[in-house]
Image (cartoon, rainbow, N blue to C red):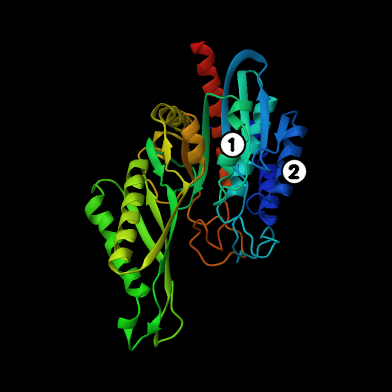
């Protein structure tokens, strides 16, 4: 493994930053302390800082000492999750109901390590933008930063992202060209009928049976409308209705999620769901409201940028530790918005199986969004090295092409 020596010497400092962030988790668009920490460190290292994009976002501008107009972006997320941590080690969350259970503390620390290295080794042509993004966990912070002018104010040719991945050994990377994470959409279907005595159902209009019919029919979208090779999930996760055993209620509500790897499949599912909802309600003499919210699009890696990232990873950890055709996940990631706007690549860095956790952790396994999760600090030099080498090699290639 070829790690950058200066970054190795900073390992304890980077880990201390990571653990400090872990102990003080902040939810989406509330990352004030974290943003202050990030900005202070960047400025301490002589890096120009811009703040406020997306609310609490921070952008560091690292200009090389050689002439060149090329620029590349590296992105990390800063927010935590609204869940309770069950770990009891020293750096466990100090805020009830808030936890860094997805490793954004580690992502931020790795990018800070890379920023420090790049600031101290500016013998490159062009600019590296280090992007610290708020509100990845459902808040769409990437889109907020883009809408606030991220790519207009800081023009770059490509943007790259990275996420730790439990279950993949530390020292390994995973990536695939094309879709690597799914879209995330939510739906709400509100059915209005006519309540009546359960012993006299003919005097009313039953929204419960209407919901049942809809739920069954909507699964045929996956089995009969979707192309068999196009991955998709339609999960009805909630049905709320009724309050008594002998009452047919007035209304019912269904909720759930849809996940796809392509926008075309998402379009198909949304259209067919609405058709089934409206026609089933009409057939059952009920009224219906259909709401479909597209939260995150699929995260789709660009082939050329993915091939470039694979070269960098292989040079650092060896080809045997880079999996370049990983199976995509139905989880979602708002870095997808950045990849819609610019070419780039999103990779996974192995977080191990949880053996790294300090005494005081809860039951495993050490998976994402688990109350006993903790980021693996042994990854910090590797992630920071990857970010640094990726940026330097990207700019060097651009300078040669010019």
Binning the other alpha carbons within 10 Å of mark 2 as few (below 14), some (14 to 19) or many (20 upward) gives some
Position of residue 117 in the picture relative to residue 174 (left or right): right
Q: In the image, residue 339 lies at what x, y percent?
A: 48, 35
In the image, residue 160 lies at what x, y percent?
A: 52, 33
Q: Position of residue 123 (x, y in %)?
A: 64, 18
Q: Nearer the viewer, residue 25 or 271?
A: 271
* Residue named by callout 1: 147
Task: Give the image quarter of residue 389.
Answer: top right
Q: Which residue is mark 2?
A: 36
For the residue pair 136 and 109, the one nearer the viewer reads as: 136
Compute the Cα span from label 1 to label 2.
22 Å
Q: Residue at x 50, y 32 (%)?
A: 341
Residue in front for this viewpoint, 237 or 19: 237
Residue 46: which numbered mark, if any?
Answer: none
What crowding class fits label 1: few (fewer than 14 Cα within 10 Å), some (14-19), or many (20 or more)?
A: few
Residue nearer the viewer, 123 or 239: 239
């Amino acid at each position: 493994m070829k790690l950058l020596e200066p970054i190795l010497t900073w390992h304890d400092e980077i880990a201390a930053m990571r653990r400090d962030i872990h102990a003080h988790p902040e939810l989406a668009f509330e990352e004030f302390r974290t943003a202050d920490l990030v900005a202070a460190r960047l400025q301490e290292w002589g890096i120009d800082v811009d703040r406020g994009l997306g609310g609490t976002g921070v952008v560091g501008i690292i200009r090389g000492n050689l002439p060149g107009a090329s620029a590349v972006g590296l992105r990390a997320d800063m927010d935590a999750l609204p869940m309770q941590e069950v770990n009891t080690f020293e750096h466990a969350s100090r805020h009830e109901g808030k936890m860094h259970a997805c490793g954004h503390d580690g992502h931020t620390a790795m990018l800070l390590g890379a920023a420090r290295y790049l600031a101290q080794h500016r013998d490159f042509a062009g600019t590296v933008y280090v992007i610290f993004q708020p509100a990845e966990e459902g808040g769409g912070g990437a889109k907020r930063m883009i809408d606030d002018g991220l790519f207009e104010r800081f023009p770059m040719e490509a943007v790259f992202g990275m996420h730790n991945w439990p279950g993949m050994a530390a020292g390994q990377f995973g990536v695939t060209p094309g879709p690597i994470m799914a879209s995330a959409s939510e739906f709400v279907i509100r059915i209005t009928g006519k309540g009546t005595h359960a012993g006299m159902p003919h005097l009313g209009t039953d929204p419960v049976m209407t919901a049942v019919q809809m739920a069954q029919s909507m699964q045929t979208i996956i089995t009969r409308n979707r192309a068999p090779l196009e991955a998709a999930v339609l999960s009805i996760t909630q049905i709320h209705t009724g309050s008594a055993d002998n009452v047919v209620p007035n209304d019912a509500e269904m909720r759930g999620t849809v996940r796809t790897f392509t926008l075309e499949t998402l379009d198909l599912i949304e259209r067919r769901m609405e058709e089934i909802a409206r026609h089933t309600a009409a057939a059952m003499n009920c009224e219906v409201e259909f709401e479909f919210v597209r939260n995150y699009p699929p995260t789709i890696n660009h082939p050329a940028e993915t091939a470039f990232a694979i070269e960098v990873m292989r040079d650092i950890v060896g080809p045997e530790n880079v999996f370049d055709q990983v199976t995509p996940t139905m989880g979602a990631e708002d870095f997808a918005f950045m990849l819609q706007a610019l070419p780039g690549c999103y990779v996974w860095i192995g977080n191990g199986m949880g053996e790294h956790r300090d005494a005081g952790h809860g039951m495993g396994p050490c998976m994402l969004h688990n109350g006993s999760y903790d980021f693996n600090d042994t990854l910090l030099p590797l992630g920071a090295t990857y970010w640094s080498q990726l940026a330097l090699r990207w700019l060097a290639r651009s300078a040669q092409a010019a």
